[in-house]
Image: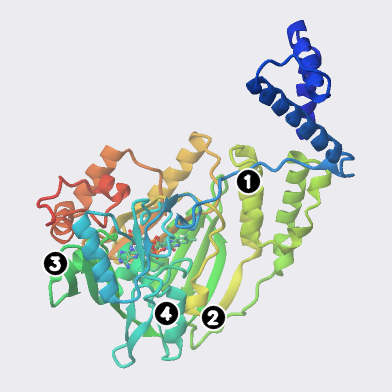
């Protein structure tokens, strides 16, 4: 590079017009001891400078040769990002679909420190949004303006084996909590697909597993310590301040930072999982019975096929132990997916790249992710993958048994945009079947609009929650709710829908009392639950 620049410089000089040719001669003369036509000291210094520059360039050229043997083969490595300053934290959600860079990421190690941080933010009108493990697919916790995370407040404070309750600092992760409960013979009633959430985030968004008799996890909160910007620390339970307690149990981090929580647990138990492949007619015929008889049940719908995978989990029966094997081994169940991957690599890449040596080590979801990544918008390609998935599940039919926290997890695959809808679908005694209608319409829409929709579309059920901001909130004790991924709504329509569905006025009133300066808020929360400007100014 240096060499190239230099040659161009020299070239320009040698092809320069006659007047500069004269300068060139003058310069040479200045270098020799011959008498000089230079008339002033300034001119002498100028030409001496030129001479030095020329000498420097000459030396640089001389020392650049010869080029190293591999010089021609070196590839340029462009900088993708400038390095971040040391005090800038990059925080992204689990899927990597939302990311912010912030200079303020506080990690207090006590309730007092948390209280001080929030009081200061309130006084200075700065943002301090609670951030858990950052799993929420919509990046609900993130804001560039400043966040507070309770990773250093992750202790188990008390276990009451008799009452089957546990009190924890809200920064503890679900996986660690379950490990700690194990030695007391306890566990949580239900789980989401993964267990990386902090208990604060887990309960604040009303996370859920599946089972028409099992509520979302916020329903397990018996009491909590909420640290607020304007009112300091408040102890909440259904006895102390029921209205605020039920609002704040699923408060989306907008009413305060949950510092401590007491949760209702259940005895540690095993489950037998039964996976089988069904179809729309069979599901319709059995739906009511299956919802009511199975402790946990979910359907995995596979677009562009008539396959519905049914997964049921129940305590082991005293009378009948199923054969805990499946007809096919893991490799046999996966071989056709690996074959499809090889064929697709040949189609989309060169022959040389199509022999991926890693292929035999990949799980089904990893294979699916790689296959989809080759051409996610090609409908025919996606349909081939979906059909391979249907066959994979057919070959994976069978039973397995394990502790509930292991059995209820589910490998959801890689990067994903998720928007989930939860709606009432009658009661256990009288299901409306709206849940199955919804899926039928959704699958028809996908086909009609030629949407390259990958599998699976997971449908689950929960009992109601008494938390007023929960999507499954209901005063009807036996109400059941179905949870399915959904398209994004237009904002105005979404706000109107939220207004009809949730006590938005009560939520906003509580927000203005506990956090008038919107310290805990971010753009997302403001969009969903817009409030007028602060009712009073901080002193
Ligand atoms: C692979 C995967 C699988 C998933 N499976 C399921 C599933 O099966 N069922 C389900 O329901 N969800 C599921 N989720 C979503 C996930 O469970 C929830 O988004 C989760 O509970 C968030 O926990 P978090 O600690 O990551 O909170 P974050 O995402 O960090 O925050 C979530 C919300 O809680 C607030 N918050 C966090 N901590 C506190 C605190 N201490 N005090 C007050 N507010 C707080 C934040 O401000 C934010 O509003 C899944 C997510 C992933 C990535």
- Disc on the earlier residue, 2 or 1: 1
Q: Which residue is mark 1?
A: 373
**Can you name the residue that lies furthest to the top here?**
18
Q: Is residue 14 above or below residue 309?
A: above
Q: Nearer the viewer, residue 403 or 141?
A: 141
Using residue 343 as the reference point, say whether residue 317 is left or right of it: left
- Write the residue at 75% across / 62% down: 360
Question: Element type at marker 2?
Answer: strand
- Disc on the earlier residue, 2 or 3: 3
Q: Which residue is mark 2?
A: 402
Q: Is residue 118 above or below residue 45?
A: below
Which one is closest to the eye, mark 2 or mark 1? 1
Which one is closest to the eye, mark 2 or mark 3? 3
Question: Element type at marker 3?
Answer: helix
Residue 474 position by quadrant: bottom left
Residue 405, position as x, y percentages in the image: 48, 77
Q: Which residue is mark 4?
A: 177
Name the disc covering residue 74, or none.
Answer: none
């Amino acid at each position: 590079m240096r060499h190239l620049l230099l040659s161009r410089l020299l070239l320009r000089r040698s092809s320069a017009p006659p007047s500069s040719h004269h300068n060139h001669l003058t310069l040479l003369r200045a270098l020799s001891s011959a008498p000089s036509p230079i008339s002033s000291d300034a001119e002498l210094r100028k030409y001496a400078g030129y001479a030095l520059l020329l000498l420097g360039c000459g030396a640089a050229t001389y020392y650049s040769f010869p080029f190293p043997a591999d010089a021609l083969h070196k590839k340029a490595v462009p900088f993708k990002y400038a390095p971040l300053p040391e005090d800038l934290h990059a925080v992204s959600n689990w899927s990597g679909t939302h990311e912010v860079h912030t200079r303020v990421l506080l990690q207090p190690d006590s309730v007092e420190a948390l209280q001080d941080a929030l009081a200061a933010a309130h006084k200075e009108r700065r943002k301090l949004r609670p951030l858990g493990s950052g799993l929420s697919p919509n990046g609900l916790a993130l804001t560039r303006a400043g966040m507070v995370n309770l990773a250093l407040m992750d202790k188990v404070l008390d276990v009451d084996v008799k009452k089957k309750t546990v009190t924890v600092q809200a920064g503890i992760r679900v996986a660690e909590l379950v490990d700690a409960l194990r030695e007391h013979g306890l566990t949580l009633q239900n789980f989401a697909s993964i267990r990386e959430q902090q208990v604060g985030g887990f309960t604040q968004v009303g996370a859920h597993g599946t089972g028409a008799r099992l509520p979302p996890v916020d329903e397990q909160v018996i009491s909590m310590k909420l640290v607020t910007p304007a009112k300091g620390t408040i102890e909440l339970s259904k006895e102390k301040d029921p209205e605020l307690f039920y609002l704040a149990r699923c408060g989306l981090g907008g009413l305060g930072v949950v510092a401590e929580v007491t949760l209702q647990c259940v005895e540690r138990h095993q489950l037998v999982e039964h996976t089988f492949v069904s179809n729309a007619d069979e599901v319709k015929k059995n739906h009511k019975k299956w919802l009511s008889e199975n402790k946990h049940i979910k359907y995995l719908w596979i677009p562009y096929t008539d396959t519905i995978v049914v997964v049921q989990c129940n305590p082991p029966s005293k009378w009948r132990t199923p054969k805990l094997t499946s007809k096919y081994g893991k490799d046999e169940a996966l071989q056709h997916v690996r074959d499809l991957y090889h064929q697709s690599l040949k189609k989309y890449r060169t022959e040389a790249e199509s022999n991926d040596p890693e292929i035999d080590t990949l799980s089904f979801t990893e294979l699916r992710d790689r296959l989809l990544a080759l051409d996610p918008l090609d409908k025919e390609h996606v349909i081939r993958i979906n059909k391979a998935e249907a066959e994979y599940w057919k070959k994976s039919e069978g039973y397995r048994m394990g502790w509930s926290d292991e059995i209820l997890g589910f490998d959801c695959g890689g990067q994903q945009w998720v928007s989930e809808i939860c709606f009432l679908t009658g009661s256990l005694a009288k299901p409306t079947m709206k849940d199955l209608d919804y899926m039928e319409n959704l699958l028809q829409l996908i086909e009609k609009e030629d949407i390259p929709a990958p599998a699976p579309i997971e449908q689950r059920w929960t009992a109601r929650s008494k938390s007023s901001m929960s999507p499954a909130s209901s005063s009807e004790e036996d109400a059941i709710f179905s949870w399915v991924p959904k398209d994004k709504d237009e904002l105005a329509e979404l706000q109107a829908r939220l207004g009809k569905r949730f006590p938005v006025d009560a939520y906003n009133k509580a927000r203005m009392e506990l956090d008038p300066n919107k310290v805990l808020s971010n753009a997302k929360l403001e969009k969903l639950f817009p409030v007028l400007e602060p009712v009073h100014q901080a002193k």
